[in-house]
Image: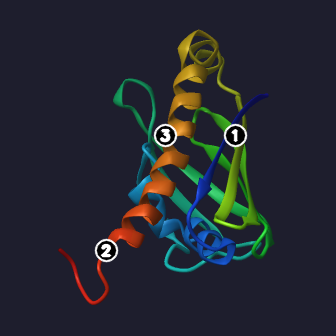
Amino acid sequence: MARVYASIQVPAPAETVFDYVSTPLNAPLWHPTSLGVSGATDHPVEAGERFTEELLVAAGRRVHAIWTVVERAFPQRWAIEGTFAGIGRGNITWTFRAQEDGTLCTREFVYAMTNPFWAAMDWLFLRRRIEVEGRQAVRNLRDVFLQARERPPGGTH
């Protein structure tokens, strides 16, 4: 099993960040490999709910992940586990810790490539790419909230 950690300070209350992250419809707006979602996606999903996400993986290949929410402890922790068609399985756990100037968000992705070809690809180069994408994802998440803070009230620029 591989583990990928990424964390960042987000300039918003933990409750707001938790709701945003746990609403799958938002994922394509900030996660670099998320192409789209279907199923229970337009609200903060609860334990037991499922959704499907189309992901862009190595060499432009698209894969469907089927996610199930396995834990929802508002606003501190949210966890999903999933299978990636023909590739493997994994789980993502988010923790949110309120701080004076926002929320410390930590994302842990634990995965296993069950397909021998993909296991070799992971060992050769995918793991490094997944680590880079995880760091980019949390930076993008922070940027969503930074941009929202910079917008003037009552409209756009």
Percent position (x, y) of residue 136? 49, 40
Count of residue discs: 3
* Residue highlighted by disc 2: 151
Residue at the image point whose x is 41% and y is 71% from the top: 149
Residue at the image point whose x is 51% and y is 73% from the top: 41
The kind of residue tagged 3 is Gln
Give the distance between the C-alpha atoms of the residues marked 3 and 2, in whole angstroms.
Answer: 22 Å
Quadrant (top left, top right, bottom left, bottom right) of the C terminus: bottom left
Percent position (x, y) of residue 147? 37, 64
Quadrant of residue 143 within the rendered picture: bottom left
Height in image: 10 above or below 154? above
* Residue highlighted by disc 1: 89
Give the distance between the C-alpha atoms of the residues marked 1 and 2, in whole angstroms.
Answer: 39 Å
Percent position (x, y) of residue 42? 49, 78
10 Å crowding of disc 1: few (<14), some (14-19), many (20+): many
Height in image: 98 above or below 130? below
